[in-house]
Amino acid sequence: MKINNSPPKNEADKAKLYTIENNYINKLKSADNRVQNNYKGQRLYFKSDLKVEEGINYYVPLSSPKESQKKITNKSVFKLFGDKAQEDFLGVLHINNLIPVPDDKAKVWSPKDNPETDDRYVILVIKQARFIKAHEKEINTNCKLMRDSKMGTLDPEYFSKNRKEIITYKRIISDLDKLEKVSKTERNNSILMRHNDVELQ
């Protein structure tokens, strides 16, 4: 896969991955231990269009490639490839492990912030981010499917046709009710702290 180094014309066209504050992830893990390890803030995430409310989006953790993951056929994971033949396996997005995150708990990953990062890893992340960007619509659709499956807000006709699949999703997805409560509390605390800082100035 060739790497195109020319900058995109618009900010919205940029392929981005994110890191999330480790302290925030630990609070989510306290609410539900199925939340994936954040590796001290080193794990990368895709920011979906799916919102809890304004200022809180769902993020999906990215994992390195494992051959066993190629056999997964349901929509709980999204496989990333660097070529049309799907021989260059780049990793997976664990959509079933999606988590709600306030804006101020996440930041765009950049190699400039990680100067000691191996060049091969930087190239891998670029390839992953660009593949994700090219398939953003499908990934967002699958994120909504996961949340609706867990929350019981699926279209009844879809549920009746895909009952076995949906029951599997409900079992493997974290307790999103609990996680959303944590995200709202953290977002509100941040707003309150900013408000207090302004008053003290």
Image (spheres, rainbow, N blue to C red):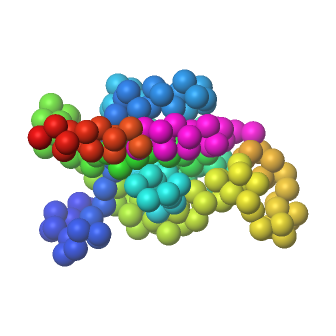
Quadrant of the rendering where the N terminus is positioned: bottom left
Determine if residue 47 is in view. Answer: yes
Most extreme residue toward the front is 199
The residue under the point 42% across, 38% down is 186
Left or right of 131 on screen, residue 32: right
Can residue 184 be found in the magenta stretch? yes
Q: Main secondary structure of the magenta part?
A: helix
Position of residue 171 measured from the top left corner of the image (x, y, whole percent): 75, 39
Position of residue 102 measured from the top left corner of the image (x, y, whole percent): 40, 46
Compare residues 169 and 20 and report the one nearer the observer: 20
Labels in figure, total: 0
Position of residue 81 measured from the top left corner of the image (x, y, whole percent): 45, 55
Most extreme residue toward the right is 160
Left or right of 94 on screen, residue 6: left
Quadrant of the rendering where the C terminus is positioned: top left
Can residue 87 be found in the magenta stretch? no
Left or right of 58 on screen, residue 32: right
The residue under the point 31% across, 56% down is 16
Height in image: 105 above or below 158?
above
Determine if residue 37 is in view. Answer: no
Q: Give the range drawn in magenta.
A: 171-187
Position of residue 20 measured from the top left corner of the image (x, y, whole percent): 36, 38
Height in image: 3 above or below 186?
below
The residue under the point 16% across, 67% down is 7
The residue under the point 22% across, 73% down is 10
